[in-house]
Image: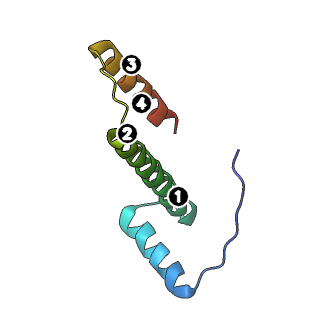
Amino acid sequence: MNTTLNISLPETLTSYINQRIAEEHFNNASDYIRTLIYAEQQRREEQKLEKQLLEGLNSPAAIIADSQEWDNFWENLTRNTQSA
């Protein structure tokens, strides 16, 4: 279900948005803003994953993973990123 959100922008940002809509062939400002929000969500998720991976690499506890564990890891990772 979609909802409506009204925002106020200075003319310079409105002009920039209109320029981007024309250049990238978005249907309207909503499509452009939605794309920006999705990209921000993706960027934050990638940062979160990177932080978790670095924490894991720097943790003292290590495990040995066999090929089945790696297959499960990649399957779960793919499933989780597709549902995000």
Q: Residue at x 34, y 43 (%)?
A: 58
SS state under label 3: helix
Residue type beneath disc 4: Leu
Residue type beneath disc 2: Ser
SS state under label 2: loop
Here the colouring is rainbow
Q: Which residue is mark 2?
A: 59
Residue type beneath disc 1: Ile
- Give how far apart the Cα atoms at labels 4 and 2 are: 20 Å
Q: Which mark is residue 77?
A: 4
Asked if marks 3 and 2 touch (Cβ < 8 Å), the reply is no
Asked if marks 3 and 1 touch (Cβ < 8 Å), the reply is no
Q: Residue at x 48, y 73 (%)?
A: 17
Label 3 or label 2, whichever comes before in sequence order: 2
Q: Which mark is residue 37?
A: 1
Q: Which mark is residue 72?
A: 3
Q: Single out the residue that lies furthest toward the bottom.
A: 11
- Image quarter (top left, top right, bottom left or bottom right) of the N terminus: top right
Question: Nearer the observer, disc 3 or disc 1?
Answer: 3
